[in-house]
Image (cartoon, rainbow, N blue to C red):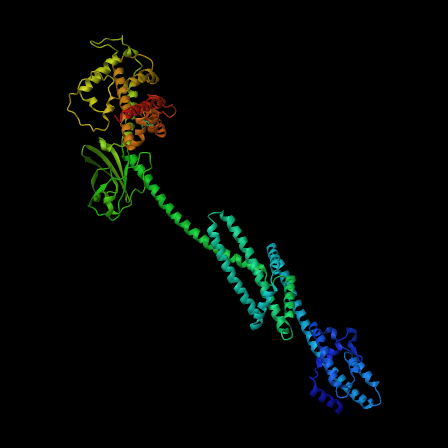
Amino acid sequence: MNNNNSSLLKSSSSAAPPLRIADVLLLHLDDDDQEEQVDGAVFPFSLVMDGCRRRRREAGGVVSRWLTCFRRPEDQHDDDRDDVINGRDLSSVVAHNDRSGPSGGCRCQRESSFNVGVGCSLLYLIAANKAELDKMMDLRTQMQVLLQNFKEELQVRNASEEGTGSNCHRSSQNLAISHVQPESSTTAIMTFDQSLKCDTPKDVECLEGIDQLQAELEAELERLQLHLEKEKLLQHPEQRSVEAVMEMLVFCATAFVRKSCFFSNLVTLKDTASSRSCSMSAGEVIDTVVEAQEAFSEVDCGVPPYELEKRLHEVLEARQQEHIRELEAALECAKHKLSEKEMEISWWRDTARVIAQHVPGPSRIFALVRFGSNHQAGQTRRLRACHEPSAEADPPVDVHTGHAKNLDSTLLLDSPSALTLDVGAISESFGLFQFTIRHSAQRKKYLFLIKKRFVVVLVVENKMALAGDLTLDLVRDSLIRQEDTIIFCLIERAKHPLNAPAYDQSYASFPGFSGSLLQYIVQQSEAMQATAGRYENPEESPFFPDNLPHSFVPPFKYPQVLHPAGTSININKIIWDMYFNQLLPLFVAEGDDGNYASTATSDLACLQALSRRIHYGKFVAEVKFRDAPHEYELAIRAKDRDALMNLLTYENVEQMVKKRVEKKAMVLGQEVSLGNDGDKQARFKVDPSVVSRLYGDWIMPFTKLVQVEYLLRRLD
Ligand SMILES: O=C(O)C(=O)C[C@]1(C(=O)O)C=C[C@@H](O)C=C1
């Protein structure tokens, strides 16, 4: 550069703002793109980014200022030329100077030197800018290569997934893409700022992200599990479980893909931005984020959902296995309990067998006692009754579980009285233990069956029931026992044919008596038995009560069980009619063997057995009334016979009675021979079906009739 130029530069630098390379460059860009060619040099400004162009407009004023400074020392006065130069390109200025007057030779030379200097500067600047632009191009290419690599990597992964993948994976991916779209750029930018501050490698970031995702998934699994357990009682368990798994899968897949996209975006952004962070503006960053998101949505998510699914399966499997273990433990517990119950059942079976062998007549389990294991032999304990199982009910298995020291509260025997029992004797007598207890006027024989710590108490004999001791079971026991008497009486009567003369009033005449042989025998027998005290017993009812003689035997103090009005109830007339008119023809053969007195005596036995049984209904009614006085009182006061009949009827008991007496008639009345009876049809002395019918059609209905009559008088 020559001296003129340096002086020019000096003067300009002292009087005006310093000239900047960018200002010079922008001077040329101020015009249209076609004007980018100056002095034959081509400027690749089309490659310059838009951001640079924005500054071109602002540069116009700067160039103008510079040119003004440049000519100020000589051409201050030439306003017209200033106007022309201002806003025109440099070549025009040079041309204009060439056309100046004679004093312009020196000036022309100075201007040429200046132009050369400017030209050199421009060339230098162009070279410098080209290098910068090349760098930017490189960066752009690198970014494209990066994106391309990323795409290829994902394609390779997808290809490998398709080999093992399922529709479920694809749907998860699709689902993932749909969730990627709404990601906001703002969020990405904020996160981007944070990621720029972080210096950790890309892989470490991904791993941290996956760990975080895993923690979130496990938290969600916990929540789902709780939700499942809460609702599994309300819904079908399998259906609920499937729904929960589906819900979990969808949720986890969504969450996973969101996270994967998020981390992939971060990585892409970081890589891109870190290389461009020095030169990019905020607007460029936004463009990059959007670009990264678009690229991501095109190439699908980064981490395959099947890995998530596999993980979920593992977690679910672990939980199910835990659940199975719990169920297995519960099953074991149930098995243990079952085996205990089975042992108990077998014990009861043994007990029943022993009872069948040792109890001679009909009996029942009276009480069940459970002793403690540590009671001492020889100890005497006072045992109280507090429970009495009914005849129909199954024997209670666990009536009481007290230890020896609690024996005072252990139950035994009948209420309300208490008994003294030598527990020491019992504890050493595993097996059967039988003894008789005298208790005031009552005499009962008990059978103790002892096994383990259970004691079964059976009443094998009940000599007499006290008023306070009367129970429905005891009354029914008596009725059952009377079945045998009735059947034996019928068998005895069936020995003779009908023997009609015994019932014929004209067959014989007795002094002072008008009636048949049978009537004579019955009346005389009753009179005679009355003197012996038979009808002192409230269970007995005479067929000829009128004018019965008094008893000559010492009175026995029968317990006062019945209401006094009960003695007035006597339905023997009905029983008499039923017996001779309906029953007798059913079980005796036609004919006459001449044994009229014997026949009449057998008839008397049958009549008395039937009468006793039927009138025992008074006792049954009394017990029922005591058990539920309020229920009966209402019907009694209303004199509602039907209501009373309903209250006292037990259909199931009646069916049982009918079956039992039929069986008894078979057993007790079967013809027995020593020959081979295998092929012969069994023969019975009394048709068992007749016995069953006798009970069904007459005995039980008449017993109920007595009950109703008794109850109607019960409140008198
Ligand atoms: O066992 C009773 O509860 C009775 O009243 C006795 C009896 C019977 O005569 O055998 C009568 C009526 C019932 O329906 C059942 C049985």
Which residue shows up at 53% across the image and 59% down it? Answer: 311
Residue nearer the viewer, 123 or 179? 123
Q: Is residue 555 above or below residue 252?
A: above
Residue 126 appears anywhere in the view: no
Q: Quadrant of ligand 1?
A: top left
- State the residue in front, 190 or 508: 190
Question: In the rendered image, which quarter is residue 437 located in?
Answer: top left
Q: Nearer the viewer, residue 67 or 440?
A: 67
Left or right, 661 with respect to 218, comes to left
Q: Write down the quadrant of residue 276 in the picture.
A: bottom right
Q: Is residue 680 above or below residue 16?
A: above
Indicate the quadrant containing the N terminus: top left, top right, bottom left or bottom right: bottom right
Q: Where is residue 488 shown, x and y percent of the image?
A: 29, 23
Q: Is residue 293 above or below residue 703?
A: below
Pinpoint residue 412: horizontal percent, then vertical percent.
25, 40
Q: Position of residue 620 (x, y in %)?
A: 28, 28
Q: Is residue 593 left or right of residue 142?
A: left
Query: In the picture, which quadrant includes the C terminus?
Result: top left
Asked whether residue 390 is in view, the answer is yes
